[in-house]
Amino acid sequence: MRSIFTIVLLLLGFRTAYSSDGWVATGATSVIEQTAEDIGVIGPLPPLPDFTAQPALDPTTDEPDLIAPPGKTPIEQSVPDEGEVGLHVTEGATPDPPTPVIVEEGVDLRPPTTEDLEKALDESEQPTWLNSVIDDHSLLWREVRSDGLSILPASDFGLTSIGFDFGLSDGEGPVWTQLKFDWTFLNGPNGPHVRPQLYDISYEFNYSDQFANVGIHAQVAPTYSTDWDNKGKHAFRLIGGGLATLELAPGFDLVGGAMYLDRPDLNVLPIYGLRMHSAGHELDIVYPRFRYAVRVGQDADGSNWMFAKTEFGGGAWAIDSDGFGNDQMGYRDWRLTFGWESREPDGDRHVFEVGLVFDRELEFERQNRTLNLGNTALIRMGRTF
């Protein structure tokens, strides 16, 4: 019986085949092969690394032998030569890209110097187009000086004027307009008799611009000047003029022009001379205004200046004089004043000044008469532009 069982086992052995997974029946598929085929697994997972193992030592150096992974080239760590940055790798290796260095251009981390602060303050004073030409344009002589209070106390012929200024343009330039109104109260003259109040209404058209080293400044100002009793032809005057500035060198300008005043005692007023200026000083040797100014303070709100000047003053009005009827009266003087001026970033300039008024004359056209008046003082506050 035992012999028969042995023969059966031998016959079954001929129907089997050896596979990598063990002995299986011929024509059958192993469970591992079927599972890998069904789920798409290519082969068994690699063994996990042994983190507890100690690195092998290189017998020649007694240092750890860095074994590169399969398909990689060992990295040779070395100290970079002078002028070189990074790691040296053997041929065929692909090193990691270097970390990019971010550099922000235009950033100066140095602390500001006194010169930098002064430059910033100078720039803060000139944010508008008008500031680049306002100094030159102020050389145009204005008969109607509005938006302020001016007092010339005198017994023979005193004047107290209150002015109002209404800007009508948007301030973008180079053209702007202004409506001005002056109300003047008189003390005298004792003879001939003149109405005690005078009025000036002026509408200014201004143009200022800069072309390279040449500045152009022009003005047309239809003006109505009267005591309000005389509304004849002499009450209306067309005042206008202009000047040009030529920059001969930085801070050194040549000035030339004229103003047409349309009045009998002074029809045309020439303007000429030199203007020298720097960041903190201004010297105008310009007829009919001579002026020296020095900057005494500056901050983000503007700058402050002290000045001394000599300038021509006066005006003309159509009047109704008792005993002579309609006439035109002209007044002129010279003024030596000292004062303080503030300049704001938007172009406004405020002034307070005191001084002496001399060489005063009062002229009547119809009467062909001129009165020489005594000296007096001047107190003025308001805007200069």
Image (cartoon, grey):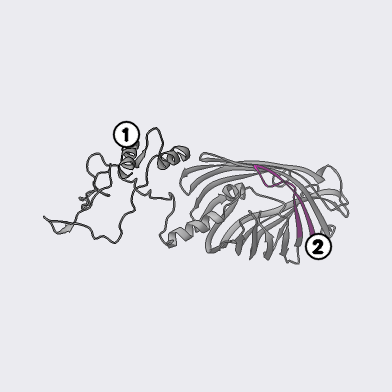
Mark drawn on residue 314: none
Residue pushed farthest front?
1
Residue ID for mark 2? 190
| Image depth: mark 1 or mark 2 in front | 1
Q: Which residues are magenta?
A: 162-189
Examine the rendered structure and indicate whether residue 233 appears above or below residue 101: above
- Quickly name the residue at label 1: 14
**Of residues 366 and 302, the one drawn nearer to the viewer in this rendering:** 302
Looking at the rendered structure, the secondary structure element under dot 1 is: loop
Q: Position of residue 151 (x, y in %)?
A: 72, 64
Is residue 58 in view?
yes
Based on the picture, tell me whether residue 171 belongs to the magenta stretch: yes
Residue closest to the eye, 69 or 121: 69
Question: Residue at left 45%, top 58%?
Answer: 116
The total number of labels drawn is: 2
Residue type at numbered disc 2: Asn
Quarter of the image where the N terminus is located? top left
| Residue plotted at (70% across, 56% down) | 361
Residue 366 x, y percent position in the rendering: 81, 47
- Distance, label 1 to label 2, CA atoms, is 156 Å
**Horizontal relation, residue 179 to residue 130: left or right:** right
Viewer-closest of 180 and 65: 65
Q: Is the residue marked by circle 2 packed among few (<14), some (14-19), or many (20+) residues within 10 Å?
A: few
Hey, what amino acid is under mark 1? Answer: Phe
**Chain-order first, disc 1 or disc 2:** 1
User: Is 51 on the left-hand or right-hand side of 195?
Assistant: left
Q: Position of residue 36 (x, y in %)?
A: 43, 40
